[in-house]
Image: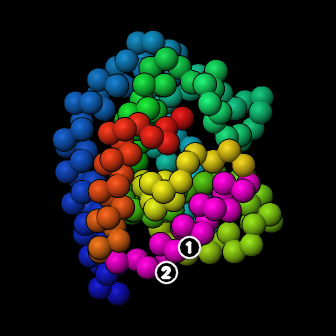
């Protein structure tokens, strides 16, 4: 399919360009993380990709080490005590998401697509939400229509509403849609909206 080839080419161009441009910010952020808290600067976590394939996502670490050791997989809360001071700033500016550009280069993610969830949550959501597995038909993304149109997940109802956006995108994947989502993403990043 020609659109898929174009989308992959655009992903490679945008991811490589963005990594080059943001590398000083990435290195400085990693230095601050190491300076202010114990543990690695880069945080790896298993996520579910296209067709249910599991991959490791890369992010700058914003929480204390072993933040979910006692609780297991849980949603981040407003003013989450597990988030470090530097991590809070990185989340508000979305700088913590930059390493996911590596996932795009590796072909595990796209710039635009449904946000990839953790295996434990996908397992539960499949049982609780009708058609949830359909969002796995396409490659997950760093940003998506659900992220720019809707707030952070707090409940199953939020997940259901975001699913509607994800399925809408899946049915209407085209160049103009991706460009519109990217433009809205810039606005979200500049305002810090939706960060937690």
Q: 92 or 137: nearer the eye?
A: 92
Location of residue 134 with respect to 100 vertically, above or below = below
Q: Which mark is residue 180?
A: none
Q: Residue at x 64, y 51 (%)?
A: 118
Judging by the rendered image, the residue that carries numbered circle 1 is: 167
The local secondary structure at tag 2 comes to helix
Q: Can residue 56 be seen by looking at this rendering?
A: no
Which secondary structure class fits the magenta region best?
helix
The crowding category of the residue bearing disc 1, from other C-alpha atoms within 10 Å (few below 14, some 14 to 19, many at least 20), is: many
22 w.r.t. 145: above or below: above
Q: Over which residues does the magenta segment extend?
A: 156-174
Query: Of 177 and 128, which appears nearest the observer?
Result: 177
Residue 161 is one of the magenta-drawn residues: yes
Q: Residue at x 44, y 20 (%)?
A: 86
Could you give the CA–CA distance between mark 1 and mark 2, rounded to whole angstroms? Answer: 6 Å
Label 1 close to label 2 by CB (< 8 Å): yes
Q: Is residue 47 visible?
A: yes
Q: Which residue is mark 2?
A: 171
Residue 162 image point, x, y percent: 59, 60
The verdict on residue 28 being magenta is no
């Amino acid at each position: 399919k020609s659109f898929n080839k174009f989308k992959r080419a655009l992903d490679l161009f945008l991811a490589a360009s963005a990594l080059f441009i943001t590398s000083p910010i990435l290195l400085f952020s990693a230095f601050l993380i190491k300076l202010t808290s114990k543990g690695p600067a880069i945080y790896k976590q298993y996520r579910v990709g296209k067709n249910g394939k599991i991959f490791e996502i890369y992010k700058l670490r914003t929480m204390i080490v072993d933040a979910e050791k006692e609780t297991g997989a849980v949603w981040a809360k407003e003013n989450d005590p597990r988030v470090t001071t530097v991590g809070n700033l990185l989340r508000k500016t979305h700088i913590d998401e930059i390493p996911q550009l590596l996932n795009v280069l590796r072909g595990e993610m796209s710039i635009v697509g449904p946000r990839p969830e953790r295996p434990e949550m996908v397992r539960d959501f499949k049982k609780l939400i009708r058609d949830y597995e359909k969002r796995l038909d396409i490659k997950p993304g760093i940003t998506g229509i659900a992220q720019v149109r809707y707030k952070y997940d707090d409940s199953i109802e939020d997940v259901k509403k975001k699913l509607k956006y994800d399925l809408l995108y899946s049915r209407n994947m085209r160049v103009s849609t991706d460009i519109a989502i990217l433009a809205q993403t810039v606005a979200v990043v500049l305002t810090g909206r939706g960060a937690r």
